């Protein structure tokens, strides 16, 4: 099976397994796992933040960060196409009592400042309005097809938020993809946000884990919330050891980006496939196939050894990662061509 449903399917490398087996361990709820500490320090330094905290998932990383920033009853401005709004079971709303305000997401993954501004009440002293405390951005943006948010846009949102006294949280599940695609250190992206979460478990290739990074004060609050949510892990150095290698080998994401472009260009040559290779900036390719629903296409492709997924609005998603070679990409294009030729009822 050529696995293009997600970069979460990456398996730990032999180097990671070796590091996991050799990692010095302790009880991380006591703050005594040296490998977790090393990972958190590396993550904080790499992102240019004071501190960082390892969580079991990106969902918990976003949830703890949002709850640390926003008190009950506060508004949190989120993209209407964001992972936080669509795929995280409404966590901060259910558990943190915040009011999500979904903001229209542009095709490039940005939220227009005018639209964000409408989330702020004209008269903040009028008691009928919930007050915004936080803006959440996503970079790269999954449902925009892996788009990288421009640095000058991030700087504009930073200024906008500072003028209004609210914080900025970056859901950077794939922020290392953004950094590699733009050729800048990840800290250049992170500097515009008060907190950043990123997934060790996606393109970076670790089996488990995400990081929240921010100020020392914020991370103290995140750590308490992580415990509250049941995310305090004991000898978590076992997974942190893989996380350290994930961060230090992030440059290899460039291969995934090249493979995604190759895939998009191959698909563009197939009659009946709608794809725009110019839109592919990182490791995500989105496309449609004439005559197929996403569901019928996913099933037909799977029967031929190609696993792809859906991305909402009837679109199909293919994600490249370390488990996918250039030859796999070429084979995937052949499978798509065969499936399209046979037609939806083939
Ligand atoms: C995957 C993802 C998450 C959530 O991470 P999990 O580890 O699956 O909980 C959050 N945001 C974005 C943009 C993601 O792609």
Image: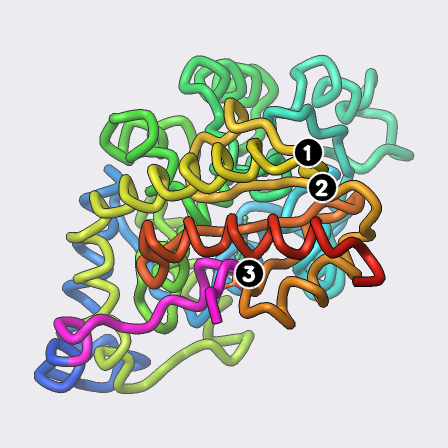
Question: For numbered disc 2, what is the local secondary structure?
Answer: strand
Q: How many other residues sit within 10 Å of disc 2, few (<14), some (14-19) or many (≥20)?
A: some
Q: In this image, 130 relative to 22: left or right?
A: right
Quadrant of residue 189 within the rendered picture:
top left
How far across and down, in percent of the image, does residue 308 sit?
59, 59
Please name the residue that numbered disc 2 is placed on: 288
Q: Nearer the viewer, mark 2 or mark 3?
A: 2
Q: How many other residues sit within 10 Å of disc 1, few (<14), some (14-19) or many (≥20)?
A: some
Quadrant of residue 206 within the rendered picture:
bottom left
Please name the residue that numbered disc 1 is placed on: 274
Q: In this image, 244 relative to 214: left or right?
A: left
Residue sitting at 55 percent across and 64 percent down? 306
Q: Does residue 6 show up magenta in the picture?
A: yes
- Whole-angstrom CA distance, mark 1 to mark 2, is 5 Å
Q: Earlier in the sequence, mark 1 or mark 2?
A: 1
Residue sitting at 18 percent across and 45 percent down? 45
How far across and down, in percent of the image, does residue 324 sit?
36, 58
Please name the residue that numbered disc 3 is placed on: 5
């Amino acid at each position: 099976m050529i696995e293009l449903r997600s970069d979460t399917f990456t398996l730990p490398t032999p180097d990671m397994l070796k590091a996991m087996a050799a990692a010095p361990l302790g009880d991380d709820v006591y703050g005594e796992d040296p490998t977790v500490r090393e990972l958190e320090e590396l993550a904080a330094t790499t992102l240019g933040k004071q501190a960082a905290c390892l969580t079991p998932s990106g969902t918990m990383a976003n949830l703890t960060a949002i709850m640390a920033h926003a008190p009950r009853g506060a508004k949190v401005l989120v993209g209407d196409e964001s992972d936080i709004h669509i795929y995280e079971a409404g966590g901060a709303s259910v558990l943190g009592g915040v009011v999500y305000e979904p903001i229209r997401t542009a095709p490039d993954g940005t939220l227009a400042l005018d639209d964000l501004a409408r989330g702020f009440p004209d008269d903040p002293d009028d008691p009928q309005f919930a007050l915004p405390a936080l803006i959440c951005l996503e970079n790269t943006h999954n449902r925009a097809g892996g788009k990288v948010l421009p640095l000058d846009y991030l700087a504009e949102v930073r200024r906008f938020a500072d003028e209004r006294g609210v914080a900025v949280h970056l859901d950077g599940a794939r922020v290392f993809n953004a950094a590699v695609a733009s050729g800048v250190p990840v800290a250049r992206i992170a500097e515009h946000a008060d907190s950043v979460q990123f997934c060790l478990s996606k393109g970076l290739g670790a089996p488990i884990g995400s990081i929240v990074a921010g100020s020392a004060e914020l991370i103290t609050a995140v750590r308490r919330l992580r415990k509250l949510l049941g995310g305090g892990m004991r000898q978590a150095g076992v997974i942190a050891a893989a996380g350290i290698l994930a961060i230090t080998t992030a440059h290899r994401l460039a291969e995934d980006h090249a493979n995604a472009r190759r895939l998009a260009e191959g698909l563009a040559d197939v009659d009946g496939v709608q794809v725009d290779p110019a839109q592919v900036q990182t490791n995500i390719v989105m496309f449609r196939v004439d005559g197929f629903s996403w569901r019928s296409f996913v099933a037909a492709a799977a029967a031929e050894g190609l696993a792809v997924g859906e991305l909402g609005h009837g679109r199909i998603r293919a994600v490249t990662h370390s488990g996918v070679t250039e030859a796999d990409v070429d084979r995937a294009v052949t499978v798509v061509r065969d499936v399209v030729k046979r037609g939806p009822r083939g």
